[in-house]
Image (cartoon, rainbow, N blue to C red):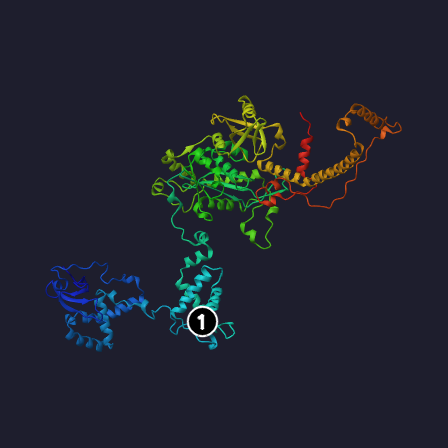
Amino acid sequence: MLVKNDLFEDKGSNRYRVLAIPDTPGRGWVMPLSVKNGWPIYRDFGVLTGHADPKPVTRKHPSGLPDLAFHTETARARARKALEAIEPLLNNPQIFEPALRGTLVKARAKELKQSETTLYRYLRLYWLNGQTVLALIPDFDKIGRRLLGTTANRGRRPKDGKYCTFQMSPIDVENVETAIRKYFLNGEISTLAGAHFRMREEKYSYLDGNGDSYLLPHGEFPSIHQFRHVARTRFKLAEVLRKKRGKKEFDREHAAHLGSALEQCVGVGHVYEIDATIADIYLVAKEDRSSIIGKPTLYFIYDRWSRLVVGFYAGLENASWTGAMLAILSIAADKRELCTRYGVPYNPEDWPAHATFPEKFVGDRGEMASKSSDRICDGMQSTVTNTQSLLPHRKGTVECGFKLFHASIADIAPGYEPPRNAVKRRAKHYHQDASLTEDEFASTALMHAIAHNRRIMEGYDLLPRQVLAKVPAMPLRLWEDDVASRSGALARYDYDYLHLQLLPRGEATVTQDGIFFKHCVYTCPEAEELGWFVSAGKRGNFKIACSYDLRLVDSIVVYDPKDPRRAYECKLAAHSEKVTGYSFAEVDFIRRMAVLNNFDGQAEADQAKAALRRHVGKLSADAVAQRLVAAKGLSKSARRADTAAARDAERAASRRVEARMPSLSSNFAQNVIELPVRPATAPHSAPPTLPEQARQLDTGPEALQRPSVSRTPLRDLLRKKQQEPIK
């Protein structure tokens, strides 16, 4: 059954609105919505639809328009005024009758002193749009020209009438869009003005009779203002920023950052975020505080759920797997010993996550993307995830941790350099204030971790359960509150096992002379007892697995090839003791430098060899000529007949020349031999020290430049070691 304001369709899919049902429920006045300039008609609903009981068309609102409150006050006032004008007509049932409608409207128009056309328009809008005040809301958004791509004599007039405003057509709009997309978005031009000029050159120019190109004058091409208008209205800001700044920068700086890091984290110990940064502070040498050693590397490991600092490392190692390994090791390190080492008060309550490891480590495609990080997955049953490059907000917890650390020491730590100082003109020399040593900086980082774990985090989104349980937004308390429900998913590992597991793995070669690994020779009693060296000498060299620390070559750990669970620590053999205390990078550098040194002397050796060959060749040629003259007419046996007698005669002649007594007139007290004076050499700059040279190992071919022929500290060191007495 239909009621007032219902919509229904007839057999031809024409839509009607029920205006009034004066007599019977099956008949009434309807407004045809599909007919242009239609008026109410009286019809039988069943005849129109072909059904005895027509079904109304589903609709959300009688008028199909939003609520009155969503419109402006001006629009609402216009609607109320229009309703007041036709309200007496609507209250009169005769308004539906075509023969009487004109008289009623004419009388009302005369009364209001308004146009009859205006009242007719109000009536039609009222009946078409739902017979409410909303039906009379004016369409302000449709006022004006709706044809896109034309100027229609609009636009700002140029000053002093220098030229006429260019009237854009759809073709001109297409030219502008093409130029913006071709030159500004996808090209190398960085400004809209540049793209506008290229468009003029390509689309709005002409060739004269000589074939020379000329630009059209002003007023005959889209102006820069029209060009920019099309850019604003036809291209989304997100599209422009993504094209001009790049997808990564757009996602990092401009894209919507919706959601929270906790959405992908189920509780404490689920995700640990790890990252490194160069701390904004200069340090000094421990033995000489006047010597500045630069900025340290700082690692932090945060539990994403509770924001608890579970591990850290502060030192001079570059951001690498070694630094990440030391930071992970700090999770299981003896906290009492750690605090004692750095002079920090020890409280076991400060370390609720001691030796507790997560289900997942999240890094940033740096050291956690190296092959060595596989050790975490193999031995600790944790997974390693790396975020997309250049998107630090994907691990925002640890990134914010660095900012909080720097903010906590900015005003109290000497030698702290604000990041903005690096790009500031006439910047202050903060490095002159450097006073802290490496250990003192590590103590500062450790104390910051303890203080952070007890700070109240403003804005942390606590769960309703935590609020009702009176759990403060403190990392320490959040961990303690949630660890009970997560205990089955966490794991603990011993420090020694963890250390051995995280060390990088390699492959050593067992030979009869020892265990060779990265240009060093090692040995151990267990290898001798197992007969590895004898076996290698008899059956040939063989490979064994080993673990090593990149920072020191003094020892490695080797694994028994027959039982990998058995491991032995091997020390440097006597052959390699000269590199004790060096890192593997320094040993490799020394080897490469030795090759270069030999290469420098190769020319001299080749020259000496060539001189030898020339000398021997000349002597041989003379000797052969004399031999041919002397042996002329003699047989081969005749030349060897008197060999013994000729040898004795030759020896006697040599003795008469060589066997002479020394002169007794020499003064034995002044037995001094003067050394030759070395030629003066041009002054040269001091060569780099060993650590500086070692840092150049992975910088490319320039790291293999020939060293100066003068003596260096490295040469002196190696010479001294060679002259040490054998004990």
Neighbor class of circle 1 (other Cα within 10 Å; few <14, some 14-19, many 20+) is many
* In this view, 360 is above or below 727: below
Image location of residue 111, percent across then percent down: 21, 77
Q: Which residue is more in the foreground, 299 or 713?
A: 713
User: Which of 420/393 is in front?
Assistant: 393
Residue 352 visible in the picture:
no
User: What's the residue type where badge 1 is placed?
Assistant: Phe
Q: Pick the residue in front: 424 or 202.
A: 202
What residue do we see at 54% from left, 30% from top? 509
Residue at the right extreme, as displayed: 665
Numbered disc 1: secondary structure: loop
Quarter of the image with the C terminus is top right
Residue 525 image point, x, y percent: 56, 23
Q: State the residue in front, 339 or 545.
A: 545
Q: Is residue 360 left or right of residue 583?
A: left
Name which residue lies at 40% across and 67% down. 173
Quadrant for the N terminus in the image: bottom left
Q: Position of residue 471 (x, y in %)?
A: 38, 40
Residue 132 left/right relative to 160: left
Please tell me how many numbered marks the rendered image carries.
Answer: 1
Q: Which residue is mark 1?
A: 221
